[in-house]
Image (cartoon, rainbow, N blue to C red):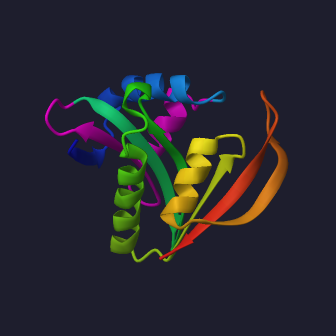
Amino acid sequence: MLLTFERAKKEDLEEIHEIEVASFPDPWSVDSLWTFASDEQVRTLITARDMESGELVGYYALQYVLDEAEIAIIAVKRKFRRQGLGRRILEEIKSFAIGQKIHKIHLEVRSENEAAVHLYRSFGFLEVGRRKNYYEDPKDDAILFCLSI
């Protein structure tokens, strides 16, 4: 599947939020998503669409300052998971980071999200710490990862 990436627009927010709710036990609100989408200085919310059908298949939220960035969210619509789209989104984030002269990308993930943990490790992210019982409902540790570019 070929993907096209672009900054999220206000009309994308409901569809993004549907994926958010289906993907996370503690989803962001539409207002929080809009905060990232509407900030053109240090935050961005980017949609990933199937180039052929135009269907929204995933998105990411990123915040950055100077030469470091943090991935706030990566989500792929359930029916498109396990098809390499998460890796493709990470490649897009890395490309964006290089263009912004970012040298480190940080993220945190639930320790029990085995698919995501495996993806980040296989992409070259290194575990740099843990936050014990960071997440609620269900209680889980956060694994802190960093990728040096």
Residue 78 x, y percent position in the rendering: 44, 27
The residue at 39%/25% (across/down) is 79
66 to 57, vertically: above or below: below
Quadrant of residue 41 within the rendered picture: bottom left
Side of 148 relative to 112 (left or right): left
Q: Inspect this view and state whether residue 70 appears.
A: no
Residue at the left extreme? Answer: 52
Quadrant of residue 134 within the rendered picture: top right
User: Residues in magenta?
Assistant: 27-54
Residue at the right extreme? Answer: 132
Q: Inspect this view and state whether residue 97 appears.
A: yes
50 in the magenta segment: yes
Side of 110 relative to 59 (left or right): right
The residue at 44%/46% (across/down) is 60
58 in the magenta segment: no
Residue 17 x, y percent position in the rendering: 46, 26
Quadrant of residue 1 within the rendered picture: top left
